[in-house]
Amino acid sequence: MKTNMKLTAVFVPDEDGGFIAYIEEIPGVNTQGETLDEAKANILDALNLVMETRRTLAKKELKNNPAPKRKYIREDIVFA
């Protein structure tokens, strides 16, 4: 099964030059760039960093507070 996920990147020209960028659907994914191309590259880096950090925090939380004594399935999913 192929799944496509679309997110909305917003690029706002800054008064002092360059662009401010953020992902509309995911709070905390924001960055900037001197050019639009740089801002586009940086927003992908920011998205990856936020997702990696959230994954690390979730694993730490699970380790400190194990799931209830019932069977469950955890698996990675990839959005293309």
Image (cartoon, rainbow, N blue to C red):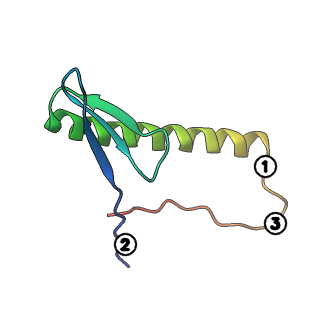
Q: With 67 as the anchor, is 60 left or right in this view?
A: left
Q: Residue furthest bottom?
A: 1
Q: With 62 as the anchor, is 30 left or right in this view?
A: left
Q: Amino acid at mark 2?
A: Thr
Q: Which mark, residue 3?
A: 2
Q: Tell me the CA gap for discs 2 and 3.
A: 29 Å
| Residue to which mark 1 is pinned | 66
39 over 76 or under it: above or below: above
Q: Of discs 2 and 3, which sits in the foreground?
A: 2
Residue 61 in picture, x, y percent from top left: 71, 41
Q: Of discs 1 and 2, which sits in the foreground?
A: 2
Q: Tell me the CA gap for discs 1 and 3.
A: 11 Å
Q: Which mark, residue 70?
A: 3
**Label 3, residues with CA under 10 Å away: few <14, some 14-19, many ≥20:** few
Q: Nearer the viewer, residue 55 or 46?
A: 46
Q: With 18 as the anchor, is 23 left or right in this view?
A: right
Number of marks present in the image shown:
3
Q: Nearer the viewer, residue 34 or 4?
A: 34
The residue at the point 36 percent across, 57 percent down is 7
